[in-house]
């Protein structure tokens, strides 16, 4: 059974035997192949058909292969061209490559060499297609139209996003945890001139401080115990694209100074190295912290703040855009219904009222987790209040000694109580995790772990 290929070839050669030989051989190998005898015929055929790869003779009557190459690159720049010649010289090969030819084959054609060359070209073409499709999917996924909102506050944010995206300015996204800061950063990137470049994300709060510098700036081999190889940091990985620094408020003073220099001069050194590296990267940062207070407390550099805060964006919490809750509930209901193979799901009036009244200290992320849980647990197509966690029914702000539903086991009751106390602390401390952790008597890292565990 012959292999099938996803590219179409055009053979251009004035010698009938050579033309038919190549066409027959490549068709037997599973390629779709058309053959013509002149450059003029090739251009005429290309205007009517799609073709990814052209194999053209170099020396032909009328239009020769070099002239045909120039015409093809002018009219169809993404087409791959391979020149064939019985007069192969290094000079001609170099000339053809400068004009845009992918490669150069000498006659008589080595058919095995030709197949290897075509396989390499096909792999590159398929990779390019996948990358283009991925970029389009990402652009659609992170489009303004795809953002679920009818809130006037969010419309103001998106208006500012539309104006800042095409620029090169740094952006500081502010807002409580779960408001969608990462999503806004992606929208900015995929609507910017850098959208074809990488978007690299690093969470400054999720990586231990002694490893964070290496993650951001990279390190040289032998820079510290265990550094067995050279490591390219996030800045180098983001070359030509965007680096998103999430939870920037958790950056140590030493790293703040190094980041400031990078933003100002576009240069840095890897850990353990003295070679200055220059990069072209746009920086977008985000935080839920009160950076102004951190500056007053000398925990955050004011000069870095000004560099990061060229364009500030403030995302409102979900409790301040309640008109979006019904839209988000329906969106997540469809999303998780598809993922769990549950069709035609609906939410009862009582359950919907509970979802509308709840203050959402965890914002959109918490609402998403609540709906996912309800979809997974519901026994019928109609989601009712029994499919929602007890704290929605009892209300946040009730005393910690509230009576738990009788159908919960002891471990489940302890988890619900812990979740309830964390929500209470966050509410009392205005969503500031550092202060909430102090009130609860746990470290901020433990608190972040539990926020993730409970979907807050």
Image (cartoon, rainbow, N blue to C red):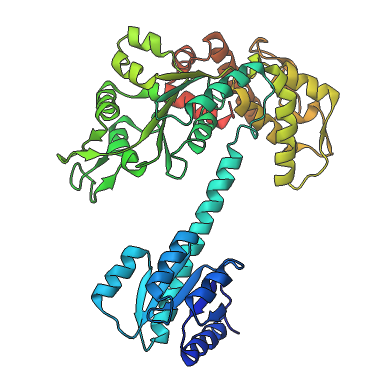
**Quarter of the image with the C terminus in it:** top right
Q: Position of residue 101 (x, y in %)?
A: 38, 68
Q: Pick out the residue farthest to the left.
A: 274
Q: Position of residue 73 (x, y in %)?
A: 44, 62
Q: Position of residue 232 (x, y in %)?
A: 29, 45
Q: Give the image quarter of residue 69.
A: bottom left
Residue, x 54% and y 13% (percent of image)?
A: 425
- Is 382 above or below relative to 150? below
Q: Give the image quarter of residue 326.
A: top right
Whether residue 199 sits left or right of residue 330 in the image: it is left
Residue, x 40% and y 70% (percent of image)?
A: 67
Residue, x 43% and y 75% (percent of image)?
A: 63
Whether residue 447 sits left or right of residue 211 in the image: it is right
- Is 352 above or below relative to 2? above
Q: Pick out the residue farthest to the bottom.
A: 17
Q: Pick out the residue farthest to the top.
A: 296
Whether residue 259 sits left or right of residue 374 in the image: it is left
Q: Nearer the viewer, residue 381 or 288?
A: 288
Is residue 270 something one can see in this rendering? no
Residue, x 68% and y 29% (percent of image)?
A: 370
- Is 151 above or below relative to 89? above
Q: Nearer the viewer, residue 54 or 170?
A: 54
Q: Nearer the viewer, residue 122 or 299?
A: 122
- Is 357 above or below relative to 22? above
Q: Nearer the viewer, residue 128 or 167?
A: 167
Q: Pick out the residue farthest to the front.
A: 62
Q: Give the image quarter of residue 199.
A: top left
Q: Position of residue 45 (x, y in %)?
A: 58, 72
**Quarter of the image with the N terminus in it:** bottom right
Is residue 295 something one can see in this rendering? yes
């Amino acid at each position: 059974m012959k292999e099938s290929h996803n590219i179409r070839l055009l053979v251009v050669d004035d010698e009938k035997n050579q033309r038919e030989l190549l066409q027959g051989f490549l068709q037997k190998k599973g390629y779709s192949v058309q053959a013509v005898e002149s450059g003029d015929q090739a251009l005429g055929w290309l205007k009517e058909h799609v073709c990814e790869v052209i194999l053209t003779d170099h020396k032909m009557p009328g239009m020769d292969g070099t002239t045909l190459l120039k015409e093809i690159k002018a009219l169809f720049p993404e087409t791959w061209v391979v020149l064939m010649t019985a007069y192969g010289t290094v000079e001609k090969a170099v000339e053809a490559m400068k004009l845009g030819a992918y490669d150069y084959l000498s006659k008589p054609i080595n058919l095995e060499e030709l197949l290897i060359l075509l396989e390499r070209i096909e792999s590159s073409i398929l990779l390019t297609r996948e990358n283009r499709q991925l970029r389009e999917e990402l652009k659609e996924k992170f489009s303004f139209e795809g953002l679920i909102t009818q809130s006037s506050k969010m419309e103001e944010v998106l208006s500012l996003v539309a104006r800042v995206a095409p620029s090169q300015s740094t952006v500081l996204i502010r807002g409580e945890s779960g408001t969608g800061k990462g999503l806004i950063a992606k929208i900015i990137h995929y609507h910017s001139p850098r959208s074809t470049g990488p978007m690299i994300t690093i969470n400054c709060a999720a990586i231990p401080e002694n490893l964070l510098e290496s993650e951001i700036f990279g390190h040289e081999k032998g820079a510290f115990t265990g550094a067995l190889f050279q490591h390219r940091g996030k800045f180098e990985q983001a070359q030509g694209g965007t680096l998103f620094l999430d939870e920037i408020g958790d950056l140590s003073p030493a790293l703040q100074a190094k980041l400031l220099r990078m933003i100002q001069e576009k240069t840095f050194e890897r850990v353990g190295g003295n070679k200055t590296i220059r990069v072209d990267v746009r920086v977008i940062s985000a935080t839920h912290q009160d950076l102004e207070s951190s500056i007053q407390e000398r925990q955050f550099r004011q000069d870095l703040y000004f560099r990061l805060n060229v364009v500030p964006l403030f995302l409102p919490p979900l409790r301040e855009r309640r008109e979006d809750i019904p839209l988000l509930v329906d969106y997540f209901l469809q999303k998780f219904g598809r993922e769990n193979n549950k069709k035609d799901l609906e939410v009862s009036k009582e359950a919907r009222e509970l979802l509308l009244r709840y203050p959402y200290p965890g914002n959109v992320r918490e609402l998403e987790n609540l709906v996912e849980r309800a979809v997974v647990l519901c026994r019928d197509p109609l989601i009712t209040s029994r499919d929602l966690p007890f704290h929605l029914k009892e209300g946040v702000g009730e005393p910690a000694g509230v009576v738990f539903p009788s159908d919960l086991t002891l471990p489940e009751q302890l988890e619900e109580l812990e979740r309830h106390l964390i929500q209470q602390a966050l509410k009392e401390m205005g969503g500031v995790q550092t202060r909430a952790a102090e009130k609860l008597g746990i470290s901020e890292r433990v608190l972040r772990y539990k926020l993730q565990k409970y979907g807050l």
